[in-house]
Structures are given as C-alpha cells and as structure tokens.
Image: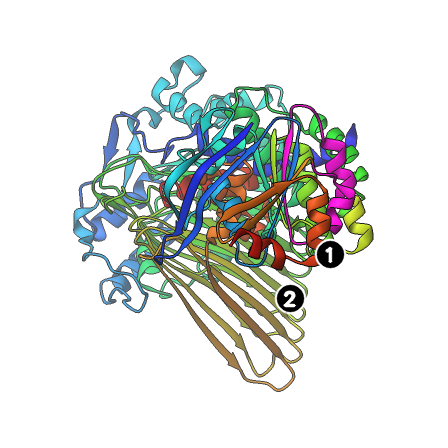
C-alpha cells in the first residue's frame, strides 16, 4: 500500500493538528528547570562585555570587536517606528550571561550529567542519543542512530550545550559548532564573515547583540558540498530575567547547499524577557540556504502578562551569482515580535524567498515581514505572508521590495493575506515598494478576511468541534507556507497553529 | 426516527416568524419529500434541524430517536447520526477534500467512542465510494469545494453522506443546478444508501428528483406549516398544477 503511505504522509499533517489540539495544553513548554546557574551581575557595561568574552575564552580581536559594538550601542536609541506598544525596557535590569553550573566541566558519562538537564531535553522531545551528545558525553556520537538524522545544536540560556553528529559532518567537510567554538577553532572564517551581513552598526538591537552575544551556532559548508543532513539549533531560555542574545552565522560556499532549522521555547513567567538575536547568512555562487524557524517563545498569558520580547535581525546576503535563499518562518510565540528576515540579492540571477505565518492571539503584538533588496541583474524574489490575528492581538506585515538601478529585468511577487478571528483584533499591511529601473516588475496582492461562520458551521455539521474546525480552516489558510517547511517541522507548525488559537472562538 | 412537533422558529436578528407550528414524523427506513413555494421555510427547517446559528426556536421540539436535537451542538447532532446535504456547499481553501472527509469521519467515530480509521482503511473506502459517484481522484485532492462545478459540489455532498453513514439524511435542494446526468448520479448514490434503518428528508422544488428517488410520503410546506401530506402522486399534482390549488384549499 505505498499509495496509502504517501497519502498518510501528506494527509497526516492535518490529522496531527487535530490530535494536537486535543492532546496539548495551551503553552506546552511553559515549565521551568530548577538548575543552579552562574550569572554575571545584572546590567551591561564594558566589564560585562569583557567578562562574556573571557567566559567564552575568546581571543583579543573578538573582545575588541564586542567593545567597539558596545561603545556604539550606548550612543544609539531604541527604534520606535514599529506598530508595537510595550513598556520601556530597562536594559540594566537584565542578566546578560547565565550558564548551568554543571557545565563547567564536561561530563564523561550519562551518570555524570545533571539529570535535570537531561530531563529538560527529554521534555522538549529531543531524542536521548542526541541528549547524550547535548549533555556533553564523550563518545556518544558513536552510538547507533535511529531514523533520519538531524544534527542539533542546543543553546540553554546563554550557552551552547553541545552539537550532535559533529564527526559525521566533519567527514563531509561541514563545520557545525557553537559560535564560541568557531571563534576559537576557525577564527579565519569568523573574521572573514562575521558582521559582513548585519554590521555592528546595523540597528539598536543588532548592535547590542554584537556586544553581548553569548553563544549561537556556526555553520560552514565547503564548496560543492550538499550538507548530508538537516542542521538544527534549539534555543531555550530558562533562567529568569535573563536576556538571550544568540548569534548565528551560516556560510554556504560556492555550489554548497544546506537546510537549517531553528526552534525556540521558554518557560512561562510573569515578567517579560528580552531576546535579541542576529542571524547572518552568506551565500556564494550557485549555493543555497533554506532557513526554517518555528518560533514558540512564551507569548504571555491570556491577560497579557509576561512573555518574550523578541527583537531579531535576520539577513541573508546572496553575495554571488545564482545564490539562493529561502526563509520560512512560523511565528506563534512572543509577546512582542519585531523581525524582518531579509534578502540582499547582490549576485546576478540570485533568488530570495520568504514564507511566513505569523499568529497573534490574546495580547500578542507582531510586527514582522521581510526586505527584498534587488541589486543584481535578473534577480527574483517571492514573498508569501499569512498573518492571523485573534483575541486582542495586533498583527502587522511590514515589507520592503527595492529594485535598484542596476537590478534590471528583476521580478518580485508579493502575496500578503490576513485572517481575523473575532472583532477585537487588528491586521495591518505596510508594504514599501521602490523601483529604480524600467525593466523590473513588482506585483503585490493583499487580502484580509475573517474566519467565515459558514465554513465553521459546515465543518461542525460534519462532526468536528469548534476548535477542530478553526484549526482546519486556519491551516488551510496557511497551506502554502506550511508546504514550504521540512516535513517534521510542518507537523509541529500545524500543531502549533492549532494550539496558538485555542480559546480564540466561542 | 425524526419527530418534529409544533415547531415555531423565528430569525434571531429580526422579529420574523418562519416556521409556525410545523409537525412531521419520519419513521425509520422511509423517504419523505418536502415541497413548497419559495419562502415557505424549507431551508430554515434544514438549518434549524442541523443547528445553524441565526434562528430562535420559540415553541415546539424536534427529536432524533427520542433525544432532543435542539439542545445539541451541531457536531453532537452529526455524531448522533444527522446529516445535512447543503444547498450551497461551502468552500474551504487550502484544505484537501480527503483531509476534510477523514477529519470528519474520525471526529464522529471518536465522539461515539469508536476506533479511528487509519489512512489505509480510509483510503480504501473513500476510493470505492468516490468511484460510484464518478468523483475523480483529483477531486479528492483538491481543496474542499473550491473550483468545483455545481454538479461536483452536489456529488461531493453525497460522497460525504456515504462516508459518514448518517441515520437521518436531510437533503436541501440537492437537485438545484444539476443536469439530468448529474441528477441521476446523485439519485443513484442516495438510493444505494437506502436501508431499513436510515431515513431521508428530501427538500425540493421540483418533482423531477422524485422520479429518481421514490418518496414514501410527500409533504407540502407553505407559510411555515405542512398544509398537506400524501403519496408520490401529490408531487405529480404539484408538477401539473403548481401550488395554487393546494394553497387555496388550505386557505
């Protein structure tokens, strides 16, 4: 019955959603791990920046790079143009560095690993063998693998705990490690590319990140190599009042390709937490990066208390001819989302794609979108954005399509759909379009609709309850984007869509 | 099976009575047809029975196998065995027809405490039933009712009926917009489902459909009440003379 199996895979995605609605709580990852932590003192200053650099055993040039960023940051002001409303952030009331105490010495066997750390990964659904590696057990890489391989780098609060499958990746020439390790082990690559896509001075949050980033992932795919497995980073904010500032740098050298997944969760807390990450993608000639995110930070409770403030700068530089990047994001968490994964289409015939689902429920606010900057000839970009608002939430799509004079015969297609559930939420679309040559073409389509009572009644008259019906209709609305995700992520994302909208009707 | 007693229904938004004391009994295994002029309350009856919002029952009751229907949520009525074939089937963009069907079938099975069908089991059944209704595999994959022709939509409703195996089927003007061939397909589908423990309430304007689906009883609905009931010959009489005489007779 191979046909049945195919169907199961295709159709199974929706089934997962429906089951997930029934089986899961409203925020599945809201628990907290009681672990002894080392903190740097609260607040940020040059000493803290030096301390973070020292804790990561960084060379002098890196410390200087950070300090330069810090000195710039103190002269900058927080941007206010986004359609977001939140109290003033006290940047001196945050911890900028936190690390589980047990990670000071690398454990030799599972018995030595803090069982609470193991339990944390278990709860997050990361398989045991990977847990062993994540927990830093030496030799765990040689245990037999089951199923399809996904190499994982896990960042717990500020520290990368370990990266799986490093040996196997190394055989293919792929470097996948924490950025702090890369700074020590591969300084020539880091020096060459760090800050070349998102410069230190880029924006307030990126500059802060440049000064205080504690860890993150680093990937280098050498020329002509197709990465033999999917790579994934799993971010977890656990400690209270701790800002998380990861820095991710991915380089696909000429003709290389890689698919990279990013997942995020955090415990439920009354106080808000700050997250300001930077992701830089460098794509050289004929190379391709597919970057998928399922962002599920704690969104705050139904009264708008707590949640993550998510200020993220993600940018891809298609630096040479025929480079290709595809951003796919499913944004369901965070109290505040400020995020615009962008594509600089510098190489001729380079291509950028952006597929996004942004869901805002209760009191969440999302201001998200993309920038497509066409610099090279015959460049192509495509934007498909699906925004869903429910409860009292506000959801803004903000996007820029810019065709520069040299970017002749380039094309963009933008499709921007908003779906409203209930009558107290808002959807906003703010497209900026600049065309500076005569041969390029830009298309923009936008729709706004409400979840239709007739659709819900139709589903319910066939036996589905109201939440199942909403999940089905909304997943239908998001289909094009869900299809752009790798299969496992698509399932998780569909389940998340359903969970995020719980309690939004009736 | 279905008992409707002195049912009074008004619109929620305005003070307008639509059904004014409708009484009807459909025993198990029988096919009853309801005919009536425009605005007589035919569609309202089908919506009220299946639980759509927007209507208020001011008096009377409706029961399915003795259980009061009017207190149940639409999905509970569905799991209890009630099915409405829509006059205007609704489009759901992005949701595959097969996914929709399987979600519905398994939701009902779950509600009744039965094991859910696996993909393989489901596929086998749906393929066979779709073939009977000349529904192509492509139509099963396409989003629910999106871009379907009028005939395809109605056949799709019958496919849902066949898959859900309800005990009480209500068909709201399923014949509207169908050509002769499509009507025959739909009728064959319905006839194949006829059984001693399944009943049908067929709402239609025209006698035509009743040539293919032979009713046991025909009711004439006018101004919110049943004004006359009889055998299949009543439908022929309407076809021949219109509703005028019957309405005059009823006063």
Q: Is residue A57 above or below residue A418?
A: above
SS for dot 1: helix
> Considering depth in this image, is A442 or A106 the residue closer to the camera?
A442
Please identify the quarter of the rendering in which residue A112 is found: top left
Q: Residues within 10 Å of mark 1 (few under 14, many from 20)?
A: few
The residue under label 2 is A350
The label number, if any, that marks residue B240 in the structure image: 1
- Asked which colour scheme the image uses, the reply is rainbow
Q: Is residue A185 left or right of residue A46?
A: right
SS for dot 2: loop
**Residue B194 falls within the magenta-colored stretch:** yes
> Considering depth in this image, is A389 or A123 the residue closer to the camera?
A389
Please identify the quarter of the rendering in which residue A350 is found: bottom right
Residue A33 locus on image (x, y percent): 30, 27
> Considering depth in this image, is A191 or A361 the residue closer to the camera?
A361
Disc 2/disc 1 C-alpha distance (Å): 71 Å
Residue A367 locus on image (x, y percent): 37, 60
Q: Is residue A191 left or right of residue A427?
A: right
Which chain hosts label 2? A
Q: Nearer the viewer, mark 2 or mark 1?
A: 1
* Stretch in magenta: B186-215
Residue at the (22%, 44%) spot, across then down: A305
């Amino acid at each position: 019955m191979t046909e049945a199996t195919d169907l199961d895979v295709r159709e199974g995605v929706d089934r997962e959603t429906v089951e997930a609605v029934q089986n899961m709580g409203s925020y599945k990852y809201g628990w907290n791990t009681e672990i002894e932590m080392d903190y740097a003192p609260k607040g940020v200053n040059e000493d803290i920046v030096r301390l973070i650099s020292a804790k990561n055993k960084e060379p002098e040039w890196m410390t200087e790079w950070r300090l330069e960023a810090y000195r710039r940051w103190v002269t900058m002001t927080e941007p206010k143009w986004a359609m977001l409303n939140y109290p003033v952030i006290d940047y001196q009331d945050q911890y900028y560095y936190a690390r589980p105490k047990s990670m000071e010495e690398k454990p030799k066997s599972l018995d030595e690993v803090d069982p609470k750390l193991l339990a944390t990964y278990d709860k997050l659904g990361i398989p045991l063998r990977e847990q062993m590696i994540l927990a830093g057990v030496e030799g765990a890489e040689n245990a037999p693998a089951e199923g399809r391989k996904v190499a994982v780098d896990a960042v717990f609060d500020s520290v990368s705990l370990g990266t799986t499958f490093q040996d196997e990746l190394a055989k293919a020439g792929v470097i996948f490690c924490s950025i702090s390790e890369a700074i020590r082990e591969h300084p020539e690559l880091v020096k060459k590319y760090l800050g070349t896509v998102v410069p230190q001075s880029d924006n307030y949050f990126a500059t802060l990140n440049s000064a205080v980033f504690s860890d993150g992932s680093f990937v280098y795919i050498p020329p002509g190599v197709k990465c033999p497995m999917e790579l994934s980073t799993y971010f977890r904010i656990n400690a209270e009042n701790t800002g998380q500032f990861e820095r991710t740098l991915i380089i696909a050298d000429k003709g290389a390709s890689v698919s990279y997944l990013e997942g995020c969760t955090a415990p439920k807390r009354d106080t808000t937490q700050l997250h300001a990450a930077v992701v830089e993608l460098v794509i050289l000639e004929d190379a391709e990066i597919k970057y998928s995110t399922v962002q599920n930070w704690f969104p705050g409770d139904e009264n708008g208390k707590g949640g993550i403030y998510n200020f993220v700068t993600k940018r891809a530089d298609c630096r040479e001819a025929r480079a290709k990047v595809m951003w796919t994001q499913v944004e369901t968490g965070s109290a505040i989302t400020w995020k615009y994964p962008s594509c600089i289409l510098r190489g001729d015939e380079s291509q950028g794609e952006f597929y996004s689902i942004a869901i805002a429920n209760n009191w969440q606010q999302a201001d998200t979108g993309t920038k497509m900057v066409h610099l090279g000839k015959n460049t192509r970009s495509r934007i498909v954005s699906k925004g869903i608002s429910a409860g009292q939430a506000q959801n803004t799509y903000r996007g820029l399509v810019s065709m520069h004079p040299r970017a002749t015969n380039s094309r963009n297609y933008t499709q921007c759909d908003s779906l409203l559930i209930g009558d107290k939420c808002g959807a906003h679309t703010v497209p900026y379009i600049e065309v500076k040559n005569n041969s390029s073409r830009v298309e923009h389509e936008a729709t706004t609709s409400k979840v239709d009572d007739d659709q819900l009644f139709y589903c319910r008259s066939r036996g589905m309850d109201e939440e199942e019906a909403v999940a089905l209709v909304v997943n239908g609305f998001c289909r094009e984007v869900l299809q752009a995700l790798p299969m496992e992520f698509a399932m998780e994302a569909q389940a998340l869509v359903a969970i995020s909208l719980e309690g939004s009707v009736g | 099976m279905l008992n409707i007693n002195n049912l009074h229904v008004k619109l929620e938004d305005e003070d307008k009575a639509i059904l004014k004391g409708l009484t009807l009994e459909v025993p198990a295994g029988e096919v009853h047809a309801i005919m009536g002029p425009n605005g007589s309350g035919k569609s309202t009856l089908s919506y009220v029975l299946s639980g759509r919002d927007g209507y208020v029952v001011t008096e009377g009751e409706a029961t399915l196998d003795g259980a009061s229907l009017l207190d149940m949520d639409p999905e509970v009525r569905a799991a209890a065995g009630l099915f409405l074939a829509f006059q205007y089937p609704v489009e759901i963009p992005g949701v595959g027809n097969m996914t929709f069907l399987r979600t519905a079938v398994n939701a009902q099975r779950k509600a009744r405490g039965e094991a859910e069908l696996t993909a393989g089991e489901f596929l086998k059944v749906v393929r066979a039933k779709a073939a009977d209704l000349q529904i192509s595999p492509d139509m099963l994959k396409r989003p629910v009712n999106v871009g379907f022709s009028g005939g395809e939509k109605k056949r799709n409703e019958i496919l849902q009926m066949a898959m859900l195996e309800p005990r009480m089927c209500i068909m709201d003007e399923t014949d509207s917009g169908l050509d002769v061939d499509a009507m025959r397909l739909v009728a064959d589908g319905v006839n194949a489902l006829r059984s001693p423990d399944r009943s049908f309430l067929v709402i239609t304007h025209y006698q035509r459909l009743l040539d293919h689906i032979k009713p046991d009883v025909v009711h004439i609905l006018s101004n919110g009440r049943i004004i006359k009931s009889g055998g299949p010959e009543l439908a022929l009489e309407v076809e021949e003379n219109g509703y005028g005489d019957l309405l005059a007779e009823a006063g």
